[in-house]
Image (cartoon, rainbow, N blue to C red):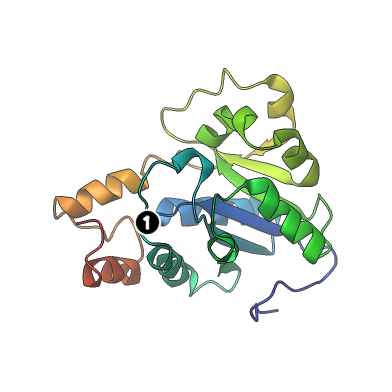
Amino acid sequence: MHYSGELKKKAKRLIGLFGGSFDPIHNGHLQIAAAAQEQLLINEIFFIPAAIPPHKQHITLTEANHRLRMVQLSVEDNSDFKACDLEIRRSGVSYTIDTLTYFRHNYNLTCDQLHFIIGADGLVNFHKWLEPEKILQCCQVVVYNRAGVDLEAVNENIKKKVFFLNAPLIDISSTTIRNKIRSGESLNEFMPERVVDYILSNGLYI
């Protein structure tokens, strides 16, 4: 079944939400989503660019329309991956609990149908998020490993409530890619070619 602009209201479908600034999205994000889909049998994964991430309120992000378009270009060949503009349309600070509540209430999803994908760095600071316990109660939190992140400080009770993906360590970041663009290095190994073309044609990150 294909996406037609609204999430299909079908019982027992497993939905994944992958939030982030995606500034820009890269192959690491796509590989993580693919691993989550394979290991958890998720039917559809929604990539949700944040309007203003709570932890990046004082950082200037690329305009939301560009970040959304890059996500759209990245996922257009995979019918199971969707670009979602929910947080951009909502504007303001993008709180995870609000997005989860929206999907749960508007599409009648149970907690075991809804998965939220975050990086290990997000888990380290999870206790600082808005209503972390409520997040754990209303979805399955899925964590992927990131280079240089030490999970020893994470509360053991939180660790027991999340699912850790068995996936290759992601050692590429959007920051690294932005720096490569400024230095004129090739990007083709880091993101889909159409995204590279979009970045260059729009003069982003220069």
Q: Is residue 163 left or right of residue 175?
A: right
Q: Residue at x 80, y 72 (%)?
A: 9
Q: Is residue 47 left or right of residue 104?
A: left
Question: Can you give x and y, in whole percent of width and height, for residue 137 in the image?
Answer: 80, 40
Q: Residue furthest top?
A: 153
Q: Which residue is mark 1?
A: 24
Q: Residue at x 57, y 18 (%)?
A: 152
Q: Is residue 174 left or right of residue 15?
A: left
Q: Which residue is nearer to you in this view: 92 or 18?
A: 92
Q: Which residue is nearer to you in this view: 23 or 130?
A: 130
- Looking at the rendered structure, the secondary structure element under dot 1 is loop
Q: Quadrant of the C terminus?
A: bottom left
Q: Is residue 2 above or below residue 95?
A: below
Q: Quadrant of the N terminus?
A: bottom right
Q: Quadrant of residue 172?
A: top left
Question: Can you give x and y, in whole percent of width and height, for residue 37 in the image?
Answer: 63, 56
- Specify whether residue 205 is in view: yes
Q: Quadrant of residue 17?
A: bottom right
What amino acid is at disc 1?
Pro
Question: Can you give x and y, in whole percent of width and height, for residue 205 in the image?
Answer: 25, 56
